[in-house]
Image: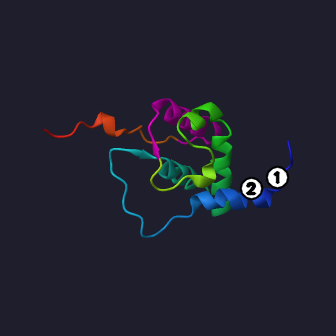
């Protein structure tokens, strides 16, 4: 496996953490991938440490779960990417707890919120 410089790694992970000020608020009945990344990064003392925390957590998430959800790269996750699989969410949550001792909020899925009749 080729070596990746820490600076390049941090730069790529940093791309994940940039947000647009004009993004609309996410509906409360879905779990957005970007929100999870932001929650993990927020537990660090500075942005670079936050990027490294994200990397540390996602190294523990099985690649097959990410691919099944259509996530091919953390680099291409945007504000609209929704986590639909509870299994993927649980894996991310467990990885966050085991690797950096943080608890993520409960999984939310719009299927859990039936439309009002």
Residue that carries the numbered disc 2 in the rendered image: 9
Residue at image x 52%, y 37%? 69
Q: Main secondary structure of the magenta part?
A: helix
Query: Residue 85 lies in magenta, yes or no?
Result: yes
The answer to if 84 sits in the magenta stretch is yes
Q: Position of residue 36 (x, y in %)?
A: 50, 48
Q: Are the residues flagged by discs 1 and 2 in contact, CB closer than 8 Å? A: yes
Quarter of the picture holding the N terminus: top right
Q: Quadrant of residue 111?
A: top left
Q: Nearer the viewer, residue 55 or 98?
A: 55
Total of numbered circles in the picture? 2
Q: Which segment did they paint magenta?
A: 82-102
Q: Quadrant of residue 56?
A: top right
Query: In the structure shown, which secondary structural element does the residue marked by tag 1 occupy?
Result: loop
Residue at 50 percent across and 40 percent down: it is 103
- The residue shown at (65%, 49%) is 53
Tell me where residue 81 appears, x and y as whole percent. Answer: 48, 49
Q: Quadrant of residue 14?
A: bottom right
Q: Marks 1/2: CA distance?
A: 7 Å
In this picture, is 40 found above or below 69?
below
- In this picture the colour scheme is rainbow
User: Label 1, on which residue?
Assistant: 4
Observer able to see residue 19 = yes
Question: Upstream in the sequence, badge 1 or badge 2?
Answer: 1
Q: For mark 2, does the 10 Å Cα neighbourhood hold few (<14), some (14 to 19), or many (20 or more) residues?
A: few
- For the residue labelled by badge 2, is the local secondary structure a helix, a strand or a loop? helix
């Amino acid at each position: 496996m080729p070596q990746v410089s820490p600076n390049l790694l941090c730069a790529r992970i940093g791309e994940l953490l940039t947000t647009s000020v004009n993004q609309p608020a996410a509906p409360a009945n879905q779990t957005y991938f970007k929100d999870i990344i932001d929650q993990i990064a927020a537990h660090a003392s500075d942005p670079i440490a936050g990027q490294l925390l994200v990397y540390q957590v996602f190294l523990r998430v099985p690649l097959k779960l990410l691919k099944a959800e259509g996530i091919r790269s953390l680099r291409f996750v945007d504000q609209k990417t929704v986590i639909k699989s509870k299994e993927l969410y649980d894996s991310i949550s467990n990885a966050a707890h085991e690797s950096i001792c943080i608890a993520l909020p409960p999984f939310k899925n719009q299927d859990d919120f039936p439309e009002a009749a």
